[in-house]
Image (spheres, rainbow, N blue to C red):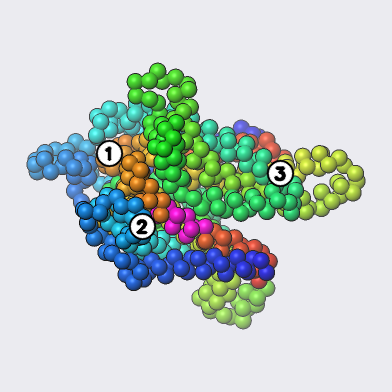
Amino acid sequence: MISKWIGKRVVMGIIVLFIVSFLSFFIMHAAPGDPATAFYGGNAQTLNAAEKERISRVFSLDRPVIVQYGAWLWETVQGNFGYSSKEGRPVSVILFERLPNTLLLFSVTMFFIIVGSIWLGTVAGMKAGSMWDKGLSTISIASSSIPPFWLGILFISFFSVKLGILPSSGTEDVGGDGGLMDKIRHLIMPAAVIILTHVGIYARFLQESIKTESNKYYVLVARANGVAKREIQKGILRNASIPYLNYIGMTIPSFFGGAVIVESLFSWAGLGQLMVKAVMTKDFPLIMGGILSIGLLVVSSLLIIDLVMYGVDPKLRKGAYSK
Amino acid sequence: MKSRKSLAFWCVVLGLIVAMTVFAGLFSTYGPNEMDMDTIYQPPGKGHVLGTDHLGRDVFSRLLEGGKVTLTVAGVSVILSFIIGVLYGGISGYIGGAVDVIMMRFLEALITIPSLILILAFQAFMQGGMWSMALIIGVTGWLVTARIVRSEFIRLKEAEFVKMAKMFGTPMWKIIFGHLLRNSVPAIFVVTLVNFTGAVFIEVSLSFLGIGVPSAIPSWGNMLFYAQNDILIGAWWIGLFPGIMIFLTILAINFIGEVLKDPRRRRLDA
């Protein structure tokens, strides 16, 4: 049962990645202008007509886009992402250098956001009408209205420029030992920016769904039957966690999008910063590789969330939604 | 009652910001691109209310002009995403059946792609002016609108009054616009507000990275792009004020959306 269910999700994920690659490939090829120029960016002026034609032929830029896409797909499926047109190194090597940093930033921020929002949301949701309840609504709206990179600029100007206690950019000190403490020092600000601008909105969502659950009949009946308060709260929390998990799943794509900006601001050597650099240098193979790997990250996080939901929601296990 | 007061307050805040930026020419004391190398990096004070930047340009005047650009890009893109979303969601919801299933599957796939990533792909090869920026944000921002419109249409299609109208032989376009679309307005309005804040965020973020609106045009994001370096030498005012403007604009819209989202204010609960 579960293997079939997972299988379905994986197939869906692959379809998504396929659509993503297809769309981005076409978007970039639909761009007006000479394809060789687009490939070589600023260096294109130095090429003469014969060279341009040779480049077009070698990279099969003179063929229809659909044929090019087919060729690209065939190579990519075999694990060959091509070579960065700027650096000349294999795209897969560059991506693998960047992946650990993005995973580190993502898992640390997601961990604190989930723990923080569950704590805040539960306290606020269970004590309806209290200071916590009212305060959280306002604070969460306010905190989610702050552009993360702007908060980052303020952090840099205070903690790096004024106090000089945290590094303003990079993943580790140049010439440093590359130890754990070094990494943590560099991680603090980017992580804090993402956590502070996101935790409120997730907490608020959990708070709202706890409040909705608390007003349902089963809670009233349980209370009338003298079920212990702790047990009732456990039940409420479990039921409220389903929409909460759904919400996390829904916002994961934009979460990754936001990380692109924060990574660039702090020069955090992750996939997001790589993407921005690749866009600036018009490094086509690298952009495609970056898009695909960020897509893969999104799809796999959604799969993890689905699995957790499968564990939490008995209706899902019994196939109640499959109709 | 409290919610009505807060609605009025935030509408006034938003209205002020929009008015100040639309009529930027009336309020600004200098030209937004007027350089004066004798007065670079002047802190806020006499002459320049909010100081000057690295080229001696007046921050206040650029702030107003930049707001015009940012809000125009966001506004145009939201109108575009609204049109696409209503068409897509409307067709899917109205026709239903296999068409609906296919269209929704496609939408589900698109929705898992971070739109910022697609926009980056767009920007890589067609970095143009502010209009192309608005176009790109609009083309990638209609997904949630489509989903909401579709679910509203499906819900309303089954409503008594729509069935009745059909029975009386009301023309299809009249049913779609007069009954279905008109009754979906509250839900669409809230989602459009959310889209607007999203569009502001995207314009500002991309310009901040230096791959958005061309740097010759002042926008809030472009101002922050230069502020990155200025802040390292202690010129805090260049980055602080555009950020506050973005924050206030989004805050106002979020609070307005919050009040309108409240089901007690709606005639139809969606």
Q: Residue at x 87, y 42 (%)?
A: A227
Amino acid identity at mark 2: Gly
Tell me: B156 left or right of A105.
Answer: right
Q: Which residue is mark 3?
A: A123
Dividing the picture into quadrants, the one containing residue A71 is top left
| SS at mark 2 in the image | loop
Q: Nearer the viewer, residue A236 or A285?
A: A236
The overriding secondary structure of the stretch rendered in magenta is helix
Q: Work out whether B60 lies above or below A220.
A: below
Q: Which residue is mark 2?
A: B45
Dividing the picture into quadrants, the one containing residue B233 is top left
Q: Quadrant of the N terminus of chain A?
A: top right
Residue B243 shown in magenta? yes
**Residue A248 appears at what percent x and percent y?**
58, 44
Tell me: A6 left or right of B120.
Answer: right
Tell me: A316 left or right of A179.
Answer: right
Query: Can residue A169 be seen in the rendering of this structure?
Result: yes
Q: Work out whether A303 lies above or below B47.
A: above
Q: Are marks 1 and 2 on the same chain?
A: no
Query: Can residue B203 be seen in the rendering of this structure?
Result: no
Looking at the image, the residue that sits furthest to the right is: A225
Q: Which residues are magenta?
A: B242-251
**Residue A296 appears at what percent x and percent y?**
46, 36
Name the chain letter of the residue that bears numbered label 3.
Answer: A
